[in-house]
Image (tube, helix red, strand yellow):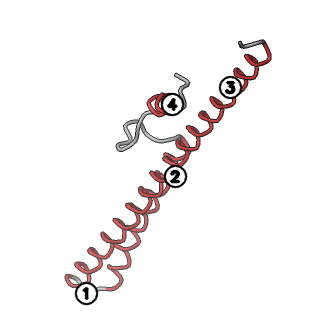
Amino acid sequence: MLNSTNLEEAIEIKCLILHGLDLTLYLFRRLRMIVCLLFGFLRLVVGGLLICFMIFTVCYLAVGSLLFLIGIMSFMLLIVVVGLVRVRLVSCWGLRRGFHGSFPDWWIREKLRGLFGLS
């Protein structure tokens, strides 16, 4: 038989488990944001460096002027800096909707609750 103290303890344990699941969901969300920003940053830097190298090669072979080449490289560096600022603004405002490869929060919460038999 369940008396009132056992029922209160069961409710308290269930609340603690739900709080732990919410904390886990929060950590998953933060981890997803960090991974997305890291890959976005790497893609931006590698892409910017690749474009800079291609323009460097073409301009130096075509024109042969180092001054013209420095101007082009400065312009490309400006594009990379603007891209990094955009990535930082996206991270401050949160991820854009439609991030591919992730599950919605409600789906993760339901699966975790089902795993612990709390649904």
Relative height, residue 106 to residue 65 (above, below): above
Q: Nearer the viewer, residue 12 or 91?
A: 12
The first of marks 3 and 1 along the sequence is: 3
Residue type, numbered disc 2: Ile
Residue type, numbered disc 1: Gly
Indicate which label's residue lies in the foreground, 1 or 4. Answer: 4
Indicate which label's residue lies in the foreground, 4 or 2. Answer: 4
Can you identify the residue that label 1 sits on? 64
- Quarter-of-image position of residue 118: top right
* Callout 3: SS: helix
The residue carrying pointer 1 sits among few (fewer than 14), some (14 to 19) or many (20 or more) residues within 10 Å by Cα, namely few
Can you identify the residue that label 2 sits on? 34
The first of marks 2 and 1 along the sequence is: 2
The first of marks 4 and 2 along the sequence is: 2
Relative height, residue 74 to residue 22 (above, below): below
Relative height, residue 62 to residue 18 (above, below): below
The first of marks 4 and 3 along the sequence is: 3
Residue at image coords 48%, 47%: 32
Indicate which label's residue lies in the foreground, 2 or 1. Answer: 2
- Residue 64 x %, y %: 25, 87
The residue carrying pointer 2 sits among few (fewer than 14), some (14 to 19) or many (20 or more) residues within 10 Å by Cα, namely some
Disc 4 to disc 3: CB gap under 8 Å: no
Per the model, the C-alpha gap separating discs 4 and 3 is 14 Å
Per the model, the C-alpha gap separating discs 3 and 1 is 71 Å
**Tag shown at residue 109:** 4
Can you identify the residue that label 3 sits on? 15
Per the model, the C-alpha gap separating discs 1 and 4 is 60 Å
Per the model, the C-alpha gap separating discs 3 and 2 is 29 Å
* Callout 1: SS: loop
* Callout 4: SS: helix
The residue carrying pointer 3 sits among few (fewer than 14), some (14 to 19) or many (20 or more) residues within 10 Å by Cα, namely few
